[in-house]
Amino acid sequence: MNKDICRWGILSTAAIAKKNWHSIANSGNGLVTAVASRSVEKAQQFIDECQSSVPVPQSVNAVGSYDELLQRSDVDAVYVPLPTGI
């Protein structure tokens, strides 16, 4: 793996995460490698929707738990698209 590439995991399928998918895909040095949700089906639906608007050439894995995404060896950074507390 090229050391100049950052491999991202997206930890949720919140709508705002689609913007980050687009940003990572267009960054030139980032790859989305996995998306986690509470169900693999929901993660795959998110991936399919993102691929239809901003396709990426690599395979992106749908993951059915947040812990599983955090344990992956192909994830260097994690985007957490959850609201911050007040």
Image (tube, grey):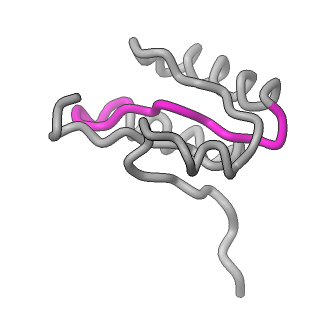
Q: Quadrant of the C terminus?
A: bottom right
**Residue 34 on the magenta segment:** yes
Q: Is residue 76 left or right of residue 55?
A: left
Q: Is residue 50 visible?
A: yes
Q: Quadrant of the N terminus?
A: top left
Residue 4 spot, x, y in % from top left = 16, 40
Residue 41 spot, x, y in % from top left = 82, 24
Q: Please say if 76 is above or below 49.
A: below
Residue at left 67%, top 40%?
36
Residue at left 49%, top 52%?
78
Which is more toward the observer, 9 or 20? Answer: 9
Q: Is residue 5 left or right of residue 24?
A: left
Q: Please say if 14 is above or below 54.
A: below
- Magenta range is 25-39
Q: Please say if 15 is above or below 41.
A: below
* Residue 83, quarter of picture: bottom right
Residue at left 37%, top 32%?
31
* Residue 23, quarter of picture: top left
- In this view, which residue lies farthest toward the bottom? 86
Q: Is residue 14 visible?
A: no
Residue 48 spot, x, y in % from top left = 66, 17
Residue at left 44%, top 40%?
73
Q: Is residue 4 left or right of residue 12?
A: left
Give the mark count: 0
Residue 54 spot, x, y in % from top left = 48, 21
**Residue 21 on the magenta segment:** no
Q: Please say if 5 is above or below 66.
A: above
